[in-house]
Image (cartoon, rainbow, N blue to C red):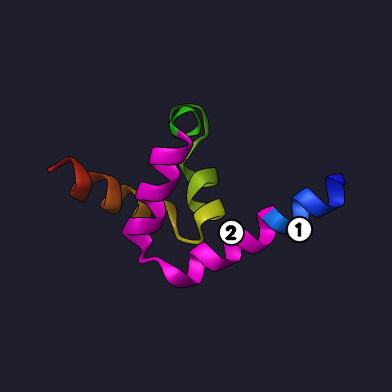
Amino acid sequence: MVYQKACVAAERRIRFLYEFSREELYLHFANNYPQFIQRIPQYLLASFLGFTPEYLSEIRNKLRS
């Protein structure tokens, strides 16, 4: 059961990486998991989403303005 949930989560993450732009991917994550945006260090979040911390910072600055 735990293995199945992990597989489903991994498949969902891969699908999102290919279907969404980077900005959309970040927005989806931020809208669905807002508690993690505040608690997870930016470099770990960037790594999880598949881009550099610098690029994540650019996305966040772009969305704020």
Q: Position of residue 63 (x, y in %)?
A: 21, 46
Residue furthest left as drawn: 65
Secondary structure under badge 2? Answer: helix
Compared across the picture, whether 10 is left or right of 14 comes to right
Q: Which element is circle 1 on?
A: helix
Q: CA distance from mark 2 to mark 1?
A: 10 Å
Q: Residue at x 48, y 36 (%)?
A: 33
Q: Is residue 24 magenta?
A: yes
Give residue 8's quadrant in the image. Answer: bottom right
Q: Residue 54 at x, y = what percent? A: 36, 54
Q: Between residues 12 and 17, which one lies in front from this camera angle?
A: 12
**Which of pointers 2 and 1 lies earlier in the amino acid sequence?**
1
8 with respect to 28 (left or right): right
List x then y, in percent, for residue 17. Answer: 50, 66
Q: Which residue is mark 1?
A: 7
Residue at 52% x, 33% y is 40
Q: Is residue 51 above or below residue 3?
A: below
Numbered badge on residue 55? none
Few, some or many residues within 10 Å of mark 2 (<14, 14–19, 20+): some
Toward the viewer: 37 or 32?
32
Q: Residue at position x 50%, y 27% from top?
A: 39
Please tell me which residue is depicted at 12% across the width and 43% down the height of the picture. Answer: 65
Q: Which residue is mark 2?
A: 13
Residue type at the position of mark 2: Arg
Residues at circles 2 and 1 in contact by the CB criterion of under 8 Å: no
- Magenta residues (range): 9-33
